[in-house]
Image: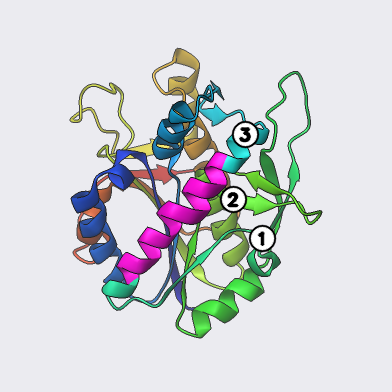
Amino acid sequence: MKELTIVKIGGIVIDQEENLKQFLSDFCELKGHKILVHGGGKLADQLSQKLGYKVKLIDGRRITDESAIKVVTMVYGGLINKQIVAALQGFKCNAMGLTGADANLILSHKRPDRGIDYGYVGDIDHVDAVGIQALLEQGITPVFAALTHDGQGNLLNTNADTIAASLATAASHLFNVRLIYCFEKKGVLTNISDDDSIINCLSYEHYQELRKSGTIAQGMLPKLDNAFETIGHGVKEVIICYAGDLKKITLDKESLGTKLEF
């Protein structure tokens, strides 16, 4: 099977023009098929505050009411997505900006209220891996914003880490998939304030211990939950790393970041 690299970019890297530009340049140098998934929560938060909307998060997950879904659609599906696509085109990478609604590629349902009403938040039901494969085979690099849909006319805010993991799992039947989560930290840390406290290899058992102790919390939880699930469903490799190290890891084969072991 052919190789496919799925990269999720998030954190403050998206907010930093020069760092994002360098990351996208490195991303374009990846060999073989590739997919980029991006978040943009900080910019969405900033716009929400300017519009007078209160941002609500529970365990790193956004509560998305009617006002919030409009904001994240504008920021994720509009501004950030199209800026990234334009930048990739500038690097001669034939990118196409997408949400899950485009070509019905990612279908979700609104998360049920089980004590917490997350609002317009989607849990993924199906990924059209064959449709995505068709794009890749035509030399198109999909760039997914953190939005899916329910098939009934509603867009749903969906965690970008979850989208990346779902894409990786679905595509693993057609490709040898490597999943890389990139952000502003060097990897998974035992001390969020110490960049040198990186965990080079993280097993599922060790993760559960760190989660129980509170060492790993908030936004890192959905990232790791999704990442470990993909390993159990056919994804060959999962790495969490600093965005600036993408090229070193993929092209120079340096052992950087945190590699997950199920």
Q: Quadrant of residue 114 in the image? A: top right
Q: CA distance from mark 3 to mark 2?
A: 15 Å
Mark drawn on residue 67? 3
Tag 1, which secondary structure?
loop
Q: Does residue 140 lie above or below 204 as drawn?
A: below
Residue 182: horizontal and vertical position, in percent?
Answer: 34, 48
Residue at mark 1? 101
Whether residue 102 is situated above or below residue 136 in the rendered picture: above
Please, which residue is most extreme toward the right here? 152
Q: Residues within 10 Å of mark 1 (few under 14, many from 20)?
A: some
Residue at mark 1 to residue at mark 2: CA–CA distance: 8 Å
Residue range highlighted in magenta: 71-88
Q: Give left or right: position of 184 versus 162.
A: left
Amino acid carrying mark 1 in the image: Ala
In the rendered image, residue 83 lying in the magenta stretch gets the answer yes
Q: Which residue does the image show at 19% across and 52% down from the upper left?
A: 18
Q: Position of residue 155 (x, y in %)?
A: 68, 49
Q: Relative to 64, is 201 on the left or the right?
A: left
Return the residue at label 2.
Answer: 147
Mark 2 residue element: strand
Q: Is residue 245 magenta?
A: no
Give the residue type that dot 3 points to.
Ser
Front residue of this view, candidates 18 and 233:
18
**Of label 1 and label 2, which has the lower sequence position?**
1
Task: Return the disc, 1 or 3, that comes first in the chain's sequence.
Answer: 3
In the rendered view, how is the structure colored? Answer: rainbow
Mark 3 residue crowding within 10 angstroms, few (<14) / some (14–19) / many (20+): few
**What residue appears at the point 40 percent right and 32 percent down from the top-left corner?**
46
